[in-house]
Amino acid sequence: MIVDVKGARMVSDVFIEMFDRLPRQGPGKNECTKKAFEILSELPERPHILDIGCGSGMQTLLLAQLSGGKVDALDLYRIFLDDLNERAMKKGISDNIRTCVGSMTDLPYEKDSFDLIWAEGSIYIMGFKEGVSYWKQFLKNKGYICVSEINWLKDNPSEKAISYWNNYPEVSMKTVEENKETISEIGFDCIDIFILPESAWWDYYHPLELRLEEMKKKYSENAEFNEFSKEIYEEMEIYKECSDDYGYVFYIMKKKE
Ligand SMILES: C[S@@+](CC[C@H](N)C(=O)[O-])C[C@H]1O[C@@H](n2cnc3c(N)ncnc32)[C@H](O)[C@@H]1O
């Protein structure tokens, strides 16, 4: 079991084996990280970046390489950060990345520290409005926040998608229009928005599916494994059927003066 910080969920051995050393922990794609980063036209030469809920850091590594700056990468679970540190060493960029076990709800950084705050697939844990509002104070004047967030893509999504996602713990899915209003209300300009392609979901689901297949041999009698894998397969089935109804959306926003 791992308990890293106050309030962190207990992490079981089964959970660790399921997610450890996977390429990423949520839907995403390097092309999309790069596309969002290239929209940021007014970053300083070597920006100071904070990557929140970084997981094993697929996007952290790319941000460090693209920006040539320093990236602080924070996650609640040490197992993911160990993986990120190893990957950074292998790429020869460990001097550009500093990892920290901590919570996005109680950031251990000084105010006005960062030129850019990044969060791929993690802001749903706090909620879009709550996350951006709280993180804003850690951003320098005219700094950027880039997040990817799960959203309804239609005004009338299917009943199946609604009943699944309305019962999913933590996720409170909004429409793109609702989030655009929120961005403006809390003192940001919305610079750009784009929807991640469906392949970004399968880049996450396929390795996870393979992992579940491998683990099935060893854990077929394990109640926790069976419960976790049932949830993951159900989520994948819903996505296969309802991918027009919802998706991940990248938001690129800039703090107003
Ligand atoms: C869906 S994953 C996304 C990971 C990574 N950004 C990616 O796209 O692959 C969400 C991440 O948020 C982390 N997380 C969960 N609760 C957190 C919290 N309170 N503070 C910081 N990180 C948290 C999880 O450990 C996980 O790595």
Image (cartoon, grey):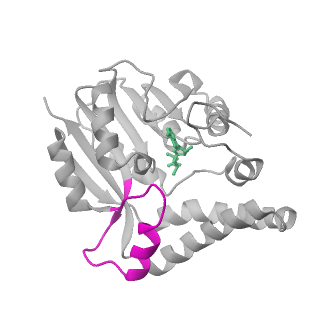
Rendering coords of residue 95 (x, y %):
56, 21
Rendering coords of residue 34 (x, y %):
40, 46
In reply to whether residue 151 is colored magenta, the answer given is yes
Closer to us: 253 or 128: 128
Q: Which range is magenta?
A: 149-173
What quarter of the picture does the C terminus occupy?
top left
Disc tally is 0
Would you place residue 78 above or below residue 183 in this image? above
Furthest residue to the top? Answer: 110
Q: Which residue is painted at 42% across and 31% down in the image?
A: 50
Q: Which residue is painted at 68% across and 44% down in the image?
A: 11
Quadrant of residue 108 within the rendered picture:
top left
Q: Is residue 243 visible?
A: no
Closer to us: 134 or 167: 167
Rendering coords of residue 238 (x, y %):
50, 76
* Residue 239 located left or right of residue 233: left
Would you place residue 226 above or below residue 95 in this image? below
Quadrant of residue 1 within the rendered picture:
top right
* Residue 249 located left or right of residue 203: left
Q: Which residue is painted at 62% across and 34% down in the image?
A: 81
* Residue 170 located left or right of residue 11: left
Rendering coords of residue 99 (x, y %):
56, 27
Closer to us: 150 or 160: 160
In reply to whether residue 165 is colored magenta, the answer given is yes
Would you place residue 234 above or below residue 148 in this image? below
Q: Is residue 10 visible?
A: yes
* Residue 13 located left or right of residue 148: right
